Amino acid sequence: MKKKNILVQLIIAILIIVLGFIVMKVLAGHKKPIKKTRPPETVTLVKTMNISTGPQQILISGEGIVKPLKEIQIVPQVSGKVMFVSPDLVNGGEFNKGDILIRIDPSDYKLSVTLARARVKTAESNLMLSKESAAAAKDEWNLHNSGNSEKSDEPSDLVLKKPQLLAAEAALEAEKANHEKSKLYLERTIIKAPFKGRVSMETIDTGQFLLTGQPVASIYSIETAEIIIPIEVEKLEWFHVPGFTEGTSPGASAVIQTSIAGKNMKWNG
């Protein structure tokens, strides 16, 4: 009896498996095939614009320190007592080209000019006397040798006093040069500004005695300045520097900007 029950259960199990397999086949036959689709292509969004070729202005910026192009020391070329100092010759003072900055006592130099002028007059007088003496010597020689055929046709330079004449001419030239030198020294007692500028340093006052070659002030020009700006090597190709790069144009232009006392300033360079 047990064997019969086991056989029945086995048959039922086999039928269930077969039935399940048949149902699965039926369902698989009615299933719709999956359609293969391609994923949408990724498109990058871009903005387009019309362009045209041609020369363009390249702007290159940099920073530097403004320095005066001319900066000199005032050094007297003559010595003497200071009679006048310009009120503008103070630290930060401004002056114009040709302004008198310093006057040195000219008394001694005026006397030197007067004495030199007198020596010129004396030398001129000596030259005239030498010329007259040379002419008289020649006349005397002619008088004594007019009827003597054995004598030479021409007198010697010593007889005609030519060495004395040359010495008198040289003395006159020397006194004239000394006169011009004394006038030059007198002119140097007045020191004028060589350009429009400002004072950066001064150590002078009225009554002070100055020595030749003694620095008394430093001044600089405000007419022209220079700015040294470091530029990257790769940017140098955009610059035209006359004499260093090709071309005949005057060179790259520059605009200088700065802020002074809260105000924005701009210059063309």
Image (cartoon, helix red, strand yellow):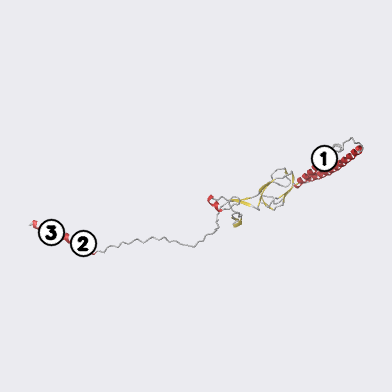
User: Which secondary structure, mark 1?
Assistant: helix
- Determine which residue is flagged by label 3: 11
Residue 269, quarter of the rendered image: bottom right
Rounded to the nearest whole Å, what is the CA distance between mark 2 and mark 1? 149 Å
Rounded to the nearest whole Å, what is the CA distance between mark 1 and mark 3? 165 Å
Q: Are marks 3 and 2 in contact (CB under 8 Å)?
A: no
- Front residue (pair 27, 209): 27
Numbered label attached to residue 166: 1
Q: Comparing marks 2 and 1, which lies closer to the viewer?
A: 1
- Front residue (pair 63, 43): 43
Instruction: Kindly tell me whether residue 7 is visible in this rendering.
Output: yes
Q: Give the percent coordinates (x, y) of residue 140.
A: 90, 39
What residue sits 76% from the left and 46% below the top?
184
- Determine which residue is flagged by label 2: 25
Instruction: Kindly tell me whether residue 201 is visible in this rendering.
Output: no
Q: Amino acid at mark 3?
A: Ile
- Front residue (pair 268, 135): 135
Q: Amino acid at mark 2?
A: Lys
What residue sits 10% from the left and 57% below the top?
7
* Callout 2 crowding tier (Cα within 10 Å): few <14, some 14–19, many ≥20: few
Mark positioned earlier in the residue sequence (3 or 2): 3
Q: Are marks 1 and 3 in contact (CB under 8 Å)?
A: no
- In the depicted structure, whether residue 34 falls above or below residue 73: below
